[in-house]
């Protein structure tokens, strides 16, 4: 087995890799994050037969290495999620926001919910199960659950809907596990009827977004903006505003807000939950 050289990440290689990640994903990596580059890129280097991250960086500098670049960017994206993560937004959606939207959309019978940076899919699958469990009146509606991420590898995994026991234990109620999942060896796969409710697509938030992502009623953009510069945050929020309907709602992460970034959304707090309405 190849053993990677200790302390292989030189300042020059860090600068090059940090700029590569910034250019491709707008994720900012300060020099203090060199340990993060090392821990996440060591496996990429090893899997591609390199003895050090320095060798990996040298290979990336050569032309025609798109696949390797994609692997590096994928490795640097944070794929942290869980079922019904920070339960309060889901409760507000179930008790208040979805009933209001259903009443407003009763004539057109169409509803679009978009999970950005969806990672392995737990967020959007949580929404799908909530709709199936609590809103049978939507059975004849055109309900569009869209899930997007930068990483093609994580999207492939999300679309399969297969989760290990640790992932299942993080936030999924037992009654929903028994109702909407089935065992496959040591893993659990979400049932096909729930998987069929979701469409997964690759979207880079700093590049052009698909024209099909328009007229969105609910946008989940949680724990994503924290990785970007203020200018990139403004750009992304402006794009969201162009895609979300005037009476839609936007969910950000608990440590995120729109302050000093945009005046196109207003902050709304209901009990312990904060969301944002287009102005």
Image (cartoon, grey):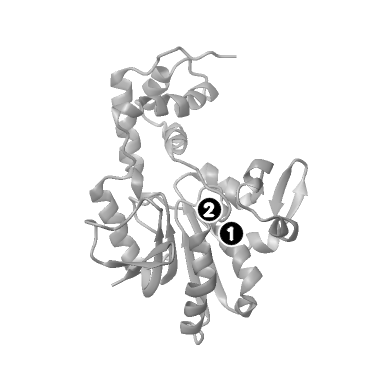
| Numbered disc total | 2
Q: Which mark is residue 85?
A: 2
Which image quarter: residue 65?
Answer: top left
- The quarter of the rendered structure image containing the C terminus is bottom left
Along the polypeptide, which appears first: circle 2 or circle 1? 2
Residue 272, can we see it? yes
Number of the front mark, 2 or 1: 2
Q: Is residue 172 above or below residue 145?
A: above
Residue at the front extreme, as displayed: 271
Residue 214, can we see it? no
Residue at 60% in and 51% down: 171
Q: Is residue 254 above or below residue 267?
A: above
Q: Which mark is residue 126?
A: 1
Which image quarter: residue 154?
Answer: top right
Where residue 67 sits in the image (x, y, percent)?
A: 46, 35
Residue at 35% in and 50% down: 225
Q: Please state if 82 lies on the left or on the right of 228 as rendered.
A: right
User: Counting other residues with Cα less than 10 Å from the Cα at mark 2, is it few (<14), some (14-19), or many (20 or more)?
Assistant: some
Q: From mark 2 to mark 1, how far is it between C-alphas?
A: 9 Å
Q: Which mark is residue 261?
A: none
User: Counting other residues with Cα less than 10 Å from the Cα at mark 1, is it few (<14), some (14-19), or many (20 or more)?
Assistant: many
Pointers 2 and 1 in contact (C-beta within 8 Å): yes
Q: Nearer the viewer, residue 158 or 55?
A: 158
Secondary structure at numbered mark 2: loop
Q: Is residue 219 above or below residue 254?
A: below
Q: Is residue 247 above or below residue 35?
A: below
Residue at 50% in and 68% down: 93
Where residue 85 sits in the image (x, y, percent)?
A: 53, 53
Where residue 54 sits in the image (x, y, percent)?
A: 39, 18
Where residue 197 sits in the image (x, y, percent)?
A: 60, 65
Q: Nearer the viewer, residue 103 or 139?
A: 103
């Amino acid at each position: 087995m190849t053993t990677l050289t200790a302390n292989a990440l030189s300042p020059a290689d860090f600068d090059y890799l940090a700029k590569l990640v910034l250019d491709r994903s707008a994720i900012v990596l300060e020099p203090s994050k060199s340990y993060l580059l090392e821990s996440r890129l060591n496996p990429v280097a090893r899997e591609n037969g390199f003895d050090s991250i320095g060798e990996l960086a040298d290979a990336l500098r050569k032309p025609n290495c798109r696949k390797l670049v994609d692997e590096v960017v994928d490795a640097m994206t944070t794929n942290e999620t869980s079922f019904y993560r920070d339960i309060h937004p889901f409760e507000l959606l179930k008790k208040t926001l979805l009933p209001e939207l259903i009443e407003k959309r009763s004539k057109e019978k169409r509803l679009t919910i978009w999970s950005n940076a969806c990672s392995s899919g737990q967020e959007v699958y949580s929404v799908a199960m909530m709709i199936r469990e609590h809103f049978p009146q939507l059975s004849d509606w055109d309900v569009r659950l869209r899930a997007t991420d930068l990483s093609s590898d994580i999207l492939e995994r999300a679309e399969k809907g297969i989760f290990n026991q640790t992932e299942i234990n993080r936030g999924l109620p037992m009654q929903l596990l028994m109702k909407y999942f089935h065992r496959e060896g040591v893993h659990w796969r979400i049932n096909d009827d729930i998987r069929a409710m979701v469409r997964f697509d690759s979207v880079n938030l700093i590049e052009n977004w698909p024209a099909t992502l328009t007229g969105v009623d609910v946008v989940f953009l949680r724990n994503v903006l924290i990785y970007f510069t203020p200018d990139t945050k403004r750009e992304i929020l402006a794009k969201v505003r162009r895609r979300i309907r005037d009476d839609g709602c936007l969910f950000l992460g608990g440590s995120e807000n729109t302050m000093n970034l945009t005046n196109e959304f207003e902050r709304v707090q209901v009990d312990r939950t904060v969301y944002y309405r287009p102005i």
